[in-house]
Amino acid sequence: MSATMSAADFAAANLSRATGAGLDPHEYLRVTGELADLEQWGEALMRAARGHLARAGRASTAISAGRHLQVAARWFHFATLGPNAERALAAAEADTAMGRALDLLEPVARRIEGPGFAGWLRGSAGAAAVTVVVPGLDSSKEEFHDVIDALLCRGMAVFAMDGPGQGVLAATTAVRADYHRVIGQVIDALGAERVGLFGLSLGGYYVAESAAREPRVAAAVAVSGPFRLHWDGLPPLVRDLLVQRAAGEEAARRFAGQVDLSSLAPRIACPLLVVDGGQDVIPGVTDGEPLARLAPHGQYLHIPHGDHLLGNARPDWLAAAADWISAALT
């Protein structure tokens, strides 16, 4: 975490991400606006999450309780983004709150875990196709509710997962560039006829790498994913995150050097949709246009005003991407 970034700057930088993930913008601005120092981030956001746990406990209906539990899970997840000595606890609380929410709102949802992954399978139990939602460097299965809902309402089954170095597994595992090995385990566990991948941020690299090396992937969407990383050009905040999630600087440098789709993109045999925002300009990160161009069945959707994760431009891409992968799989 950059020691020079103020709480106000950090909150502003994450505003579209938070609102895109479903946090109420007024509550977000109120909670983060009270921070005098960035070191208070984790404590304040966990307090907001516990407020929703309390509301869930007082709710008179299961649906109200479940919705508050979902919101609590989001707040716990966002508590992990700032400096927080209790980051592992916040991730575990997010996982628990989401499980409680699904018990109330979607009792048919199934918890599926393996050596390097954990997540929830939601939607029609008899669906022939499953879309796996893959998070990024500091995101988790609790973040992308809007993406998951867009897929579910189109009749797909959805597996929202944490992999190595992500979410509830971040405290005990480290990021790995050969993510296709994890996706292979997920596909084995799901037992679905057709599997699609929907990756966001670093998850965009993960799904492209997996689509190139795992022949059972039938379609993939990469949103704000890196084509290549250059360690020396990365901002301190991103380097710090990589060091945390890779369990050391040497491992982080090695990981960054492996994030390069130049030779893998031409090997992606399945349909691939790449979504980028024109305002997503992170030093040291090559965006996804070369991936779409080099992949044999790649398509490119560029939203000029979109930021990283395009949280400020949901109407311009989310429905289209959900329609695209639904058609590709069914």
Image: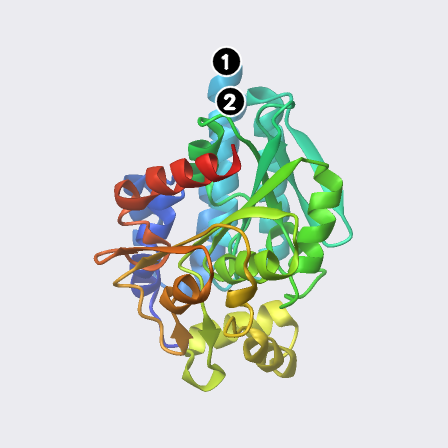
What residue is drawn where x is 63% and y is 34%? 121
Say what secondary structure mark 2 lies in: helix
User: Which quadrant of the figure has residue 267?
Assistant: bottom right
Q: How many residues crowd around disc 1 within 10 Å: few (fewer than 14), some, or many (20 or more)?
A: few
User: Residues at badges 2 and 1 in contact (C-beta under 8 Å)?
Assistant: yes
The numbered disc on residue 224 is: none
Q: How many residues crowd around disc 2 within 10 Å: few (fewer than 14), some, or many (20 or more)?
A: many
Q: Nearer the viewer, residue 154 or 238?
A: 154
What residue is drawn where x is 34% and y is 58%? 276
Residue topped by disc 1: 61
Residue topped by disc 2: 65
Q: x%, y% of residue 30?
A: 30, 45
Residue 29 makes an appearance in the image: yes
Q: x%, y% of residue 269?
A: 55, 56
Give the amino acid type for the residue marked by disc 1 in the picture: Thr
Q: Is residue 269 left or right of residue 306?
A: right
Residue 216, relative to residue 69: is it above or below?
A: below
Give the amino acid type for the residue marked by disc 2 in the picture: Ala
What residue is drawn where x is 59% and y is 27%? 102
Q: x%, y% of residue 203?
A: 52, 57
